[in-house]
Amino acid sequence: MSLRSGNIAFFIILFVFSFFTPAQAQVSMGERSPFAFTVRGGLLSNNGDLATLLRLKTEWDKTWSLNTFYSTHAEAVLGIDLIRLRTTDIVLHLSALGSEPEILAKDQFSEHRVAMSRLGMARATLTFSFNSDGYKMFSMPWHTNHEAILGVTGAYMYATDIVMTDFAKDSLGITQIRAKKPVKSVGLTFGWNWRIASSGWVIGLNGSVMWFADENPLMRFETDEASLYTSGYLTFAPRILQAGIGYHF
């Protein structure tokens, strides 16, 4: 009787184990969606070395340096997981960024506003994300609370609604500021993400350093023969610092 009872107990345990194990594995290994949506905001500036110089025609050494300097911006980002591994993901980010940078003129003694503008940017970014724990963020059933991001980014930029100030017209003699075509830039992006508790919400910090990659400038500052200053043009290589919050569906 004891042998028969032992066999019955063994088969009961085996049946229960085989019945519940697949169901438990299916729950714990659930797949997350490849899509994430993020909203970011921060500061946008141009490479200071790309400032355009308007020179006084009668004294070539006297110049005004024109650039956009710092402005705030907002960016909406759709992320799509292309390749998922345990310790890294390769993700494509498609985004739209908007900003309203001021164009400022500086000399040795003063600073003046030249124009207000609106800057739009359509970006595509390919990132590699690396976590510092044993497994990838959100890769069920294991979780890590932080990851590092490194990638390449490219953008089309355009400037619109440029409104010149009286200083630009009267003092610098600028007749118009033209920005006819979208221009390209490419660069590197980096950042860090933190998951909020065990949810799909994530907060992050990131930055991008980009180089101008177009034969046309972003803006042209045109003066006429009666103006005291020469014409100039502005190329744009964005420097971006951001903080954001997003949700991985």
Image (spheres, rainbow, N blue to C red):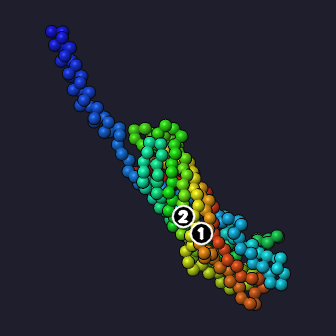
**Residue that carries the numbered disc 1 in the rendered image:** 213
Q: Residue at x 46, y 54 (%)?
A: 91
Q: Amino acid at mark 2?
A: Gly
Q: Residue at x 21, y 22 (%)?
A: 12
Q: Residue at x 65, y 79 (%)?
A: 220
Asked whether the residues under the numbered discs 2 and 1 touch, taking CB atoms below 8 Å apart as contact, a structural biologist would say yes
Compared to residue 130, the image places residue 2 above or below, namely above
Q: Residue at x 42, y 48 (%)?
A: 84
**Residue that carries the numbered disc 2 in the rendered image:** 154
Disc 2 crowd, CA 10 A, few/some/many (<14, 14-19, 20+): many
Compared to residue 177, the image places residue 249 above or below, namely above
Between discs 2 and 1, the one toward the N terminus: 2
Q: Amino acid at mark 1?
A: Ala
Of residue 10 and residue 170, the one placed in the foreground of this image is 10
What secondary structure is found at the residue carrying circle 1?
Answer: loop
* Quadrant of the image containing the N terminus: top left
**Could you say where residue 17 lies in the image, as x and y percent from the top left?**
26, 27
Residue 138 seen in render: no
